[in-house]
Image: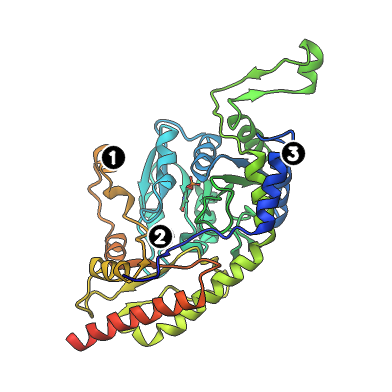
């Protein structure tokens, strides 16, 4: 039995985080209050964007962004098949139809050329994902959106802390709204949590109401009808974040720079350690000059034409060695709900090929040196024996 059990990702929570949360538990506000507002201000300042709206989780953030973008029955939104389900599910929540466009084989991000091919008269929104923490080709995607009057909802659940053309992801320089998740495996965590950033005041005001049942309050209404008075203008939700979560988020935000640096260091060490295996595996794209990587995932890809090993075998060998590698992701349209609902006939050959090859290795800030060494040693042993078999 291995003494190691190394997940692909895990949170880093320190004593300061714990103290910040404890303070809230002893305060007057537990639900959405001053800490949520402060968290939103600090996220907005970090991303250099006008507005941030904190919500219960990243999926809720996507749902509200889809509604704020006015996605509705009859509309289509184009997204990538290689993402977490929530990226495409939010289109269904709004009553619209998700359409997939294949990936760029190297970067695993949505291919703008495939977006152009997938467009119809019904296309209303584009939902690129900054896969693994590498920003998508946002400038080109934005030029497509501008030309055709489309809304861009950037799913940056993997990419808090990354930069693109000199701006932070979340700045909305190349999107109408950007969505983050603060789930425990993401760059910073609030337990569950998410947010939407935007520079658009109309989206901002709608998001605030949508997160709170569609309720509108104003000083002038209160003056006219009484202090209690409010109006539900449209159907909203309770997607509020709590002050407990926001206190953790604020504390985590202080460590964001260190978290990202640590992820970059680990990725760099993996790249160096596996450089002699490149005839058998494909390493993640190195960083580009115009964008930096947040390294939410480190995805190793098997060159299936060069090795006897398949992904299932590699997965099992690693799990037997206590390395809990994961697959990100099963193409979304494989899932029975999507098969049944969309009856897709089109092929996405690069997403298919990627899915056969991909395995995410552990990468998180407090991955220990001996754990890292164990991962590298195990993988080298596996591939060297695969080589000799050949
Ligand atoms: C995590 C994630 C989400 C959903 O976030 P939750 O906070 O878990 O709801 C959406 N999209 C992507 C790409 C994610 O990785």
Which label lies toward us, 3 or 1? 3
Are the residues at dot 3 and dot 1 in contact (C-beta closer than 8 Å)? no
Q: What element carries label 2?
A: helix
Q: Please state if 239 lies on the left or on the right of 89 as rendered.
A: right
Q: What quarter of the picture does the C terminus occupy?
A: bottom left
The residue lying at 59 percent from left, 45 percent from top is: 195
The residue lying at 78 percent from left, 12 percent from top is: 226
Quarter where residue 381 is shown: bottom left
Residue 64 on image: x %, y % = 54, 37
Residue 206 on image: x %, y % = 62, 32
Q: Name the disc covering residue 337, or none.
A: 1
Identify the residue position indicated by label 2 in the image: 113
The answer to whether the beta carbon of the residue marked 2 is less than 8 Å from any atom of ligand 1 is: no
| Mark toward the start of the polypeptide (3 vs 1) | 3
Quarter where residue 174 is shown: bottom right
Q: Is 181 above or below relative to 138?
A: above
Are the residues at dot 2 and dot 1 in contact (C-beta closer than 8 Å)? no
Are the residues at dot 2 and dot 3 in contact (C-beta closer than 8 Å)? no
Residue 40 shows in this picture: no
Q: Name the disc covering residue 34, or none.
A: 3
Q: How crowded is mark 3: few (under 14 residues within 10 Å), some or many (20 or more)?
A: some
The answer to whether the beta carbon of the residue marked 3 is less than 8 Å from any atom of ligand 1 is: no
Q: Is mark 3 on a helix, strand or loop?
A: helix
Which label lies toward us, 2 or 3? 3
Q: How crowded is mark 1: few (under 14 residues within 10 Å), some or many (20 or more)?
A: few
């Amino acid at each position: 039995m291995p003494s190691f059990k190394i997940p692909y990702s895990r949170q880093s929570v320190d004593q300061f985080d714990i103290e910040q949360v404890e303070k809230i538990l002893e305060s007057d506000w537990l639900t959405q209050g001053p800490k949520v507002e402060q968290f939103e201000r600090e996220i907005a300042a970090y991303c250099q964007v006008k507005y941030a709206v904190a919500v219960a989780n990243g999926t809720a953030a996507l749902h509200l962004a889809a509604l704020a973008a006015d996605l509705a029955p009859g509309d289509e939104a184009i997204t990538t098949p290689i993402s977490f389900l929530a990226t495409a599910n939010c289109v269904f929540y709004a009553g619209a139809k998700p359409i997939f466009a294949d990936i760029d084989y190297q970067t695993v991000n949505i291919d703008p050329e495939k977006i152009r091919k997938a467009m119809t008269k019904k296309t209303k929104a584009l939902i690129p994902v900054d896969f693994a923490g590498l920003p998508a080709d946002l400038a080109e995607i934005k030029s497509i959106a501008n030309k055709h009057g489309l809304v861009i909802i950037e799913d940056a659940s993997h990419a808090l802390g990354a930069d693109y053309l000199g701006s932070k992801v979340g700045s909305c320089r190349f999107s109408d709204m950007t969505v983050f998740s603060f789930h425990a495996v993401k760059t910073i965590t609030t337990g569950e949590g998410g947010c939407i950033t935007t520079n658009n005041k109309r989206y901002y005001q709608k998001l605030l109401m949508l997160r709170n049942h569609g309720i509108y309050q104003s000083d002038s209404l209160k003056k006219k009808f009484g202090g209690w008075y409010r109006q539900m203008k449209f159907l909203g939700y309770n997607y509020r974040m709590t002050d407990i979560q926001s206190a953790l988020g604020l504390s985590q935000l202080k460590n964001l720079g260190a978290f990202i640096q640590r992820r970059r260091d680990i990725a760099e060490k993996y790249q160096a350690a596996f450089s002699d295996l490149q005839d058998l595996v494909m390493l993640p794209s190195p960083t580009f000059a115009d964008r930096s990587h947040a390294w939410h995932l480190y995805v190793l890809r098997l060159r299936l034409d060069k090795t006897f090993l398949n992904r299932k075998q590699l997965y099992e060998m690693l799990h037997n060695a206590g390395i809990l590698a994961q697959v990100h992701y099963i193409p979304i349209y494989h899932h029975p709900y999507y098969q049944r609902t969309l009856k897709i006939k089109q092929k996405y050959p690069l997403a298919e090929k990627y899915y056969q090859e991909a395995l995410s290795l552990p990468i998180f800030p407090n991955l220990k040196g001996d754990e890292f060494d164990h991962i590298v040693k195990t993988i080298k042993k596996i591939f060297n024996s695969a080589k000799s078999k050949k």
